[in-house]
Amino acid sequence: MAMPIAWTIAGSDSSGGAGVQADLKVFQQLAVHGCSVVTAVTAQHPAAVTAIQYISVENITAQMMAMRDYLPPKAIKIGMLGHEHMIDTIVTFLRSCQSKIVFDPVMVASSGQSLFKQHQKKYLDQLNKLFPYVDLLTPNLLELSAFLNRPITSYADIEEAAHFFIERGVKSILIKGGHFQHDKMSQDYWSNGSESFWLASSRYPEKNYHGTGCIYSSAITASLALGYDLKSAIVIAKMYINRGIRLAQPIDQNTAYLMHANWPENEIDLPIVSQTPVTNVPIVFPSCGKKPLGLYPIVNEYEWLKKLLPTGISTIQLRIKNKTGNALAMEIQKSIQLAMQYSARLFINDHWELAIQYGGYGVHLGQTDLNEMNVSHIKQAGLRLGISTHCYYEVARAHGIRPSYLACGPIFHTNSKPMSFFPQGIAQLQRWRRTLSTYPLVAIGGINESNMAAVWKTGVDGIAMISAITSHKLSLLENIHSITTMQTK
């Protein structure tokens, strides 16, 4: 299959740490074919920019036209532009462009030098022409202050600034908070006007990490070209940046180049997604114990627990959608009591208040039920918590809660419930296992006797099944025996 194509429209950095050179490194590492439109040639090193030669608008137009039909991009990253005539040229091109557009408004080099020709206010006013075509704007705090002509000193300032740009036509904005010197965490903020989240990572020792903004935005662009949704693309890019900083190669005592490598797969680099700024690393939920979760049936009534628990099933989920009031409470209460008799790990889906009320073992929540109040009550009650995830954004959101286990899916096509996510397959499940090294993982979605051996080989801790158990033609005991035998193969 052909590699997806991404473009970078940016300046050349002779030192190779930022600009077009850094963008193309990122594209290659993330398995995207990178094309470049060079807007300026800079003579620079991490401590200074010594010369800038802007490319003519005729040449920039020629670069774009040469690639437009033969190498059409799935996504475009726009970086250093430099003067107003270049902005007009890019806007003209974008009017007929269907690509995802990420705009990193590079205005100042890491060394502090200005990277545009005109008076600052005039240049910033010209940049506004680009905004209606931008899917994601990625300013840092210094650039944000320049746009707004005032300092950014608080989280509230950041949230307010995001609305300023949304009102001017930008579809969404990611404000990079790495310049908050006093903060223990590095906090970025994303908003599209109706949704928002904070993205937090541990802060590393202060250095001039050359090219972080360029690399961040190009990693987002590459992920969009690969077909990831915007929120997940941001999480993937943050992992790439976190790893690059963590393993950065020092040039001198104060400066370092980020390390480039292929797909980020280390949990230490996974950021936390939260609705509010993160001030401390969250407390971990109680463990499910040393015994693997194993075969994990998901059933809709107490009667199934009566059938399954005597077979030796040690983990099971009760997901009731057709009862309310006293009928629901009674079903959950007697299910919890029965699970206790068999020392089974019973997770109650959604109904966390009743699970707490009747002394349950654990709760399983989907993404729509993850709010601070729910999670706080469950944690205070000492229950275990499992969380459903379907993409990088949801994994990062769950990571901010530190649940007892993560469920990943759908692995294969499933008819058990309507899904808005495509099947992930074995390769992605293997990647989740490599990445989420400290979490018990439960695979779910379309798993049956024909494919479960391959699922077990990925190293997951449990396999959740619904119809493969409840709709099987064999007798229940034969079915359970055949499935659990595969676990040990």
Image: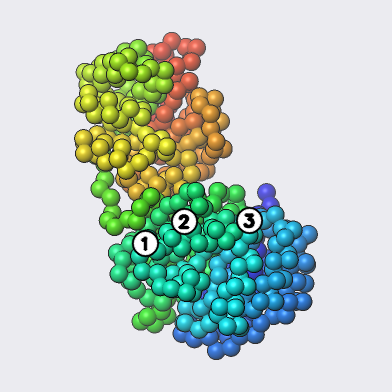
What amino acid is at disc 3? Lys
CA gap between label 1 and label 2 equals 12 Å
Viewer-proximal residue among 463 and 183: 183
What residue lies at 72% left-to-right and 80% top-to-bottom?
56
Instruction: Give, as a three-letter code, the residue at label 1.
Output: Tyr
Q: Nearer the viewer, residue 264 or 179?
A: 179
Identity, as a three-letter code, of the amino acid under mark 2 = Trp
In the picture of the structure, the residue carrying the numbered disc 3 is: 100
- Residue sitting nearer the eye, 469 or 326: 326
Element marked by disc 3:
strand
Q: Which residue is mark 2?
A: 190
> Quick one: label 1 or label 3, which is nearer the N terminus?
3
Residue under label 1, please give it: 155
Indicate left or right for 96 with 428 as reference: right
- The total of numbered circles placed on residues is 3
What residue is rendered at 55% in x and 89% in y?
50
In this view, the mark in front (1 or 2): 1
Report crowding for label 1: few under 14, some 14 to 19, many 20 or more residues within 10 A (C-alpha): some
